[in-house]
Image (cartoon, helix red, strand yellow):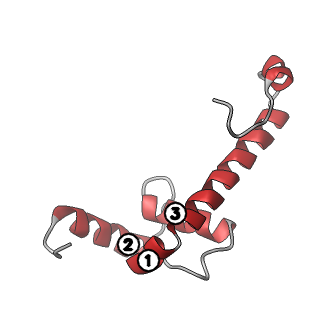
Amino acid sequence: MPEERLPKLSFNRLKTLDKDKPDIDFNWVSQFRAIAELNAFAEELSVHHTNGLLRYKDDILEKAHNYYFSTDIQRTLNSTNYPLYRMLCSYNSSDP
């Protein structure tokens, strides 16, 4: 993609902001980096290298899915708001 395209400019700005002052609340690049660090694949790729992102795309998506699924299960188990849901839920990732 040419450097003057708006998506490229936006992505480069987000990367710069992530380097200077990471903010996981408002910057998806910072969010992605935080997930990568949590899932221990930050070593094998960097958000700043697009080729690495493409090469490990399937692995990244699977690890992110597993991370969020396990986080959801933990929140469900620890929640006091919906005890009935805990009894009904099968904790299967293929369930809607």
Real-space Cα separation, disc 3 to disc 1, in angstroms: 13 Å
Label 1's element?
helix
Decide which of 30, 61 is in the foreground and name it: 61
Instruction: Give x and y (percent) for residue 25.
Output: 49, 53
Check if mark 2's residue and mark 1's residue have beta carbons within 8 Å: yes
Q: Nearer the viewer, mark 2 or mark 1?
A: 2
On-image quarter of the C terminus: top right
- Residue 49 in view here: no
Tell me if 49 is positioned left or right of 9 in this view: right
Identify which residue is drawn at 21% across, 72% down.
1
Pointer 3 local density, CA inside 10 Å: few below 14, some 14–19, many at least 20: some
Disc on the earlier residue, 3 or 2: 2
Q: Nearer the viewer, mark 3 or mark 1?
A: 3
The amino acid pointed to by label 1 is Lys
Residue 10 vs 94, above or below: the answer is: below
Residue 93 vs 29, above or below: the answer is: above
Identify which residue is drawn at 59% across, 82% down.
44
Tell me if 63 is positioned left or right of 56 in this view: right
